[in-house]
Amino acid sequence: MLIGNWKMNLNETQSLALAEKLRTKFKKWKGPAIAVAPSFLYLKQVKEILAKTPVVLAGQDVAPTEKGSATGEISGRMLYEIGCRYAIVGHSERRIMLGETNEMILRKINLCYNNGLVPIVCVGETEEQKLAGQTASVLVEQLQSALAKVNGLPENDLIIAYEPVWAVNTEQYLDPAELCSIRLLVKRTIVNIFSESFYNEKVRFIYGGSVSSINAKDYWAADCSDGLLVGAASLDADEFYFIASAGLS
Ligand code: PGA
């Protein structure tokens, strides 16, 4: 699958123009599943524009509480009702800029499941942690604290987005071949928490971090992931379509 995370990059006119271009490009799309995560403010309009395409919507985040007094938050239910089927949870920008904790991320995952959303759980090490050889321990810790206390065995899918922090929005990216060992680590950790059959049936492992038309083909060809999460390069319809098409064999 391919997910475009528009972050806080586009105003209303730009968001709607991008959605219009995606509508034309993906109208008859038959490849991997495609989702985009516009600003919350434009979800409704983008949804209407993309209605007759296979492109679905994701929230860029979800509130850590179900409803009520949570100023400025957007609940899982609100996201579902407006048409989202996925929500990004624990993005490194939120962990770093807003101090989002593993405990909050766990609550968000549970609330995704309570509201019919598939969580896209972002994990990844910083450059410092990578240089200190801590990648594996950081990933295991992030996955365990996010997933070990999930209420029951999720009925809905689970997407794990491996996004090394040093690769997000930096033009540095992971060697596609290195993804296979990370996928194995993620699989082992999740199998320990849930089960092998849960992993095989419900989990998808995707990569994010400076994916663009320069490296997309290599990521698809390496076949070490089930898809890609794209930030900057998803803001250009041609580029995003190129990345999607590079996955067609
Ligand atoms: P990037 O962002 O593709 O601009 O590095 C990826 C992400 O943050 O999901």
Image (cartoon, helix red, strand yellow):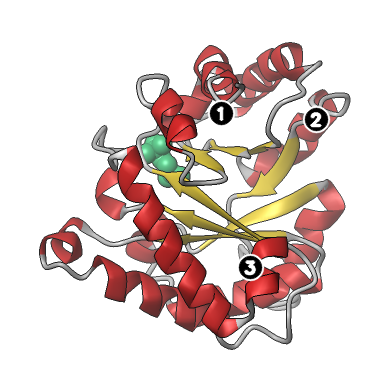
Query: Is the residue at mark 3 in contact range of ligand 1, meaning its CB lies under 8 Å from it?
Result: no
Task: Please determine whether, in this image, residue 244 is positioned above or below residue 242.
Answer: below
- Nearest the viewer among 20 and 56 is 56
Give how far across and how far down residue 199 sits, in percent: 63, 67
CB contact under 8 Å: marks 1 and 2: no
- Nearest the viewer among 51 and 197 is 197
- Nearest the viewer among 150 and 81 is 150
Crowd class of label 3 (few under 14; some 14 to 19; many from 20; radius 10 Å): many
Labels 1 and 2: the sequence-earlier one = 1
The amino acid beneath tag 3 is Tyr
Give how far across and how far down residue 45 sits, in percent: 78, 31
Crowd class of label 2 (few under 14; some 14 to 19; many from 20; radius 10 Å): some
Q: Which residue is at a point 66% across and 63% down the rendered structure image?
A: 200
Residue linked to disc 2: 54
The answer to whether residue 62 is seen in the rendering is yes
The answer to whether residue 74 is seen in the rendering is no
Q: Which residue is at a point 37% across and 42% down the rendered structure image?
A: 209
Mark seen at residue 199: 3
The amino acid beneath tag 2 is Pro
- In which quadrant of the rendered image does the C terminus lie? top right
CB contact under 8 Å: marks 3 and 1: no
Residue linked to disc 1: 11
- Ligand number 1: quarter of image: top left
Q: Quadrant of residue 160?
A: bottom right
Front: mark 3 or 1: 3
Q: Left or right: where does residue 29 sit relative to residue 52?
A: left
- In which quadrant of the rendered image does the N terminus lie? top right
Give how far across and how far down residue 49 sits, in percent: 80, 24
Helix, strand or loop at mark 1 = loop
Q: Left or right: where does residue 201 sit relative to residue 63?
A: right
